[in-house]
Image (tube, helix red, strand yellow):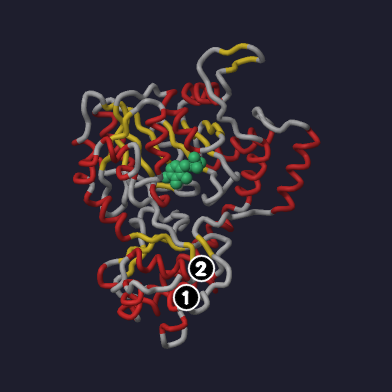
Amino acid sequence: MKSSVSHLAIFGGQPVFDKTVHVGAPNIGDRHRLHELIDDALDRRWLTNDGPYVQAFERQLTDLLAVRNCVATCNATSGLMLVAAALGLRGEVIMPSLTFVATAHALTWQGVTPVFCDVDPVTWTLDPRKAEDLITSKTTALLGVHLWGTACDLTGLQRLASRHDLKLVYDAAHALGTSYAGRPLGSFGDAEVFSFHATKICNTFEGGAIATDDDDLAARVALARNFGFVDVDRVVSLGINAKMSEVNAAMGLVSLESLDQFVEANRRNWQRYREGLQSVLGLTLYEPPMRDRSWTHQYVVAEVHEEAGLSRDELGQILAAENVGVRRYFYPGCHRMEPYWTECPDVALRLPVTEAILGRTLVLPTGTATTVETVDRICEFIRFAIRNSNQIRIRLRSPDQRG
Ligand SMILES: *Cc1c(COP(=O)(O)O)cnc(C)c1O
């Protein structure tokens, strides 16, 4: 990096990256294998409705997650909705605000009120003690989120749920390939819901899966996923269309074959980010506690503290100008999004840990689309920017700035 800041894109220079590198660029497995599988599905003329790929994908997930049942869905949001309906959730469900808005929307869509709870400052997941304070006569469930693939306090939440006779559900959208004390996430609580959206570690373009050891629950969500059909023309209950198609499942099968490589690329990048950023004043990387040694390093979450000299948003702004597509996941928090914010703006007051986290985190690019060379250059740029924060800050705050 040149010694003066004048070459930076915000000063009118050329961006450091000529092509955008961004958070959430999909991991893609063996594309030739994918093409073959899709050709076979076309030859079979069996494109959806519980086809052989969906069944194979569900079987493989069941093995990987060491759980009795996996029901594939068109996405995780529908999966959460099906679980909420099948468990008969009503009234209020306690969940963190620090998550993708789909977690809250899935409940609201089912007529259930999400009650936002603060998170543990170390794991950033639902805090059982704070959750307990929010339990009322209307509470029917706890919904934990394994944020960044870090396991929730499974013991604490299970104990709380049992004591108050509540259902316990996990949003496991980030949790594929992660275990807790040697047991894969997927079989905890009443059900866990995985996402295979394009940005997740393994993707099916769009997709999700409900994992559960409860055979009855699995049967109910499988039924509801397909309009409530038990037979060609026999419908026994209310259902919806939340099926996964064969082309999605084919992508899933191919993705699972490469899961180890995806994790390896993430580990390698994460290590590289850590080395490249360890000496940077005011910048740290989120890391789960030791017990999560199986962590897939799917997200590189930087925390920008005051000593950095640049705010999180200023750093994000200049990285964007250099064509590095960073994200402020999950800013500003579900509680500050509609329809929740208008209904209950006071909620922010009881979420100090969540609000602080959302004010300082910046997610950096990783996955198989991001090379180590790219990681090194991003680190070099961040080191340079923070060393020169005074000049950059003045530039960002001057009214005549370009671009
Ligand atoms: C991606 C994501 C979802 C939604 O998954 P879809 O498959 O896109 O519906 C839900 N919760 C979290 C935490 C997510 O990151």
Q: As rendered, which of 324 and 284 lies closer to the eye?
A: 324
Q: Check disc 2 and report the residue beneath it.
A: 323
Residues at marks 1 and 2 touching, judged by CB atoms closer than 8 Å: yes
Q: Residue at x 31, y 60 (%)?
A: 360
Q: Is residue 33 left or right of residue 167?
A: right
Badge 1: how crowded within 10 Å, few (<14), some, or many (20+)?
some
**SS at mark 1?**
helix
Tell me, for residue 157, which label it has, or none. none
Q: Which is more foreground, mark 1 or mark 2?
A: 1
Q: Position of residue 162 (x, y in %)?
A: 28, 29
Q: Which numbered marker is on residue 9?
A: 1
Of marks 1 and 2, which one's residue comes earlier in the chain? 1
User: Which of the 4 image quadrants contains residue 402?
Assistant: bottom left
Residue 250: x %, y % from top left? 67, 42
Residue 24 against residue 139 in the figure, above or below:
below
Nearest to the observer: residue 153 or residue 390:
390
Q: Is residue 313 visible?
A: yes
Q: Quadrant of residue 385?
A: bottom left
Look at the image and tell me in which quarter the C terminus lies: bottom left
